[in-house]
Image: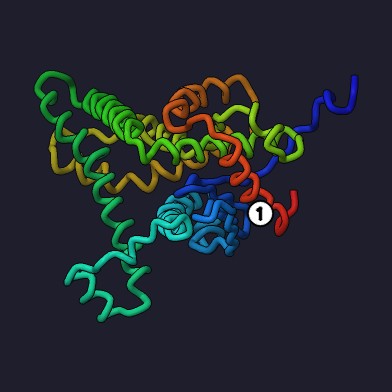
């Protein structure tokens, strides 16, 4: 057998990523590298340290590290997404500011971007909690006179998953999202190519699968499923108590989901394959086949991390 056809040893790593506007962000243990197609057609690469709560104090330990990772991803991910739009030539800051925006800019100056980012994250979390936790509880309340109390958590969970699937289907129909999903596919293909032990070239990356067990889509589905299990044991027929308990337990559910997806990423057992299968199926919606230029961008981001952190 020739060297080109020998099976390469699989690389174990914790490199993750995120699709951004016209590009990809890859994150290692200490830094992240973002590669974005600029208006001139070239690739702009930026590297920064990955800050946040992770690996500090109590957030070094299981469950708590998942809570930290979730919050850090929301904040840093939003910053990266907004900055990628600027690099790609979609800088909304050049548009005329509203009177309220002018007031904020005069009041806070250079800090306005950070304030807007935290405001965006807060609004996103409130909307997400309302859509995926408050709404299912409210809808499930109509069944409380039909089913026993213990079944309400299951009904809420099924409603939550249904709302999540409808949400993904609707956004996947948006033209603007399609390119983001293509870059999402390029991110996965590049990570899979690297983990397979092959050289990072467009030719090697292209045939790799666009599905990956550590994907954020799978994480969100785990959140939906694990919340159904956790809430099964928190039983009350009082609507307000159910709402409060669900909201308070969201960080714990996110922490457990993080540990499950970490375990899935480290194992190739049949049990892991079965647990990961629904998330992989869902990724067929949230990823799309990328073109060569998108894969080239993802490779640039991956190499940016490897240059500083090695394999």
User: Depth check: 289 or 304 in front?
Assistant: 289
Residue at 43% in and 60% down = 86
- Residue 195 sits in which quadrant? top right
Return the residue found at the far front: 40
Specify the quadrant of the image occupied by residue 197: top right
Residue 114, above or below 182: below
Q: How is the image coloured?
A: rainbow
Residue 73 lies, in percent from the top left, at 45, 52
25 vs 180: above or below: below
| Residue 252 lies in quadrant | top left
* Residue plotted at (21% across, 27% down): 152
Q: Which residue sits at x=64%, y=23%?
A: 269
Which of the image's four quarters has the N terminus?
top right
Q: Is residue 288 visible?
A: yes
The image position of residue 4, as x and y in percent, is: 84, 27
**Horizontal and vertical percent for residue 58?**
50, 59
- Would you say 82 lies left or right of 99 here? right
Q: Residue at x 19, y 68 (%)?
A: 98
Residue 22 rendering spot, x and y as whole percentages: 48, 48
């Amino acid at each position: 057998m020739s060297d080109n056809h020998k099976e390469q040893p699989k690389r174990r790593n914790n490199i993750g990523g995120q699709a951004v506007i016209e590009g990809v962000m890859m994150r290692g243990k200490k830094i992240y590298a973002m590669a974005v197609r600029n208006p001139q057609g070239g690739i702009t690469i930026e590297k920064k340290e990955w800050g946040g709560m992770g690996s500090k104090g109590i957030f070094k330990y299981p469950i708590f590290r998942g809570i930290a990772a979730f919050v850090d991803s929301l904040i840093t991910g939003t910053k990266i997404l907004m900055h990628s739009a600027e690099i790609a030539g979609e800088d909304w800051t050049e548009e005329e500011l509203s009177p309220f925006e002018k007031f904020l800019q005069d009041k806070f100056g250079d800090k306005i971007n950070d304030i807007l980012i935290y405001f965006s994250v807060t609004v996103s979390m409130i909307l997400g909690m309302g859509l995926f936790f408050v709404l299912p509880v409210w809808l499930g309340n109509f069944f409380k006179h039909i089913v026993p109390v213990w079944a309400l958590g299951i009904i809420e969970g099924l409603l939550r998953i249904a709302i999540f699937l409808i949400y993904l289907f609707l956004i996947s129909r948006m033209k603007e999202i399609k390119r983001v999903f293509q870059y999402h596919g390029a991110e996965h293909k590049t990570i899979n190519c690297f983990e397979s032990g092959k050289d990072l070239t467009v030719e090697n990356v292209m045939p790799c699968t666009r599905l990956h067990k550590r994907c954020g889509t799978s994480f969100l589905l785990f959140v939906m499923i694990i919340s159904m299990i956790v809430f099964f044991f928190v039983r009350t027929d009082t609507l307000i108590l159910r709402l409060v308990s669900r909201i308070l337990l969201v960080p714990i559910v996110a922490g457990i989901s993080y540990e499950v997806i970490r375990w899935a990423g480290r194992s190739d057992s049949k049990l892991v394959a079965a647990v990961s299968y629904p998330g992989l199926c869902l990724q067929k919606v949230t990823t799309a086949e990328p073109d060569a230029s998108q894969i080239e961008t993802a490779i640039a981001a991956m190499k940016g991390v490897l240059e500083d952190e090695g394999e």
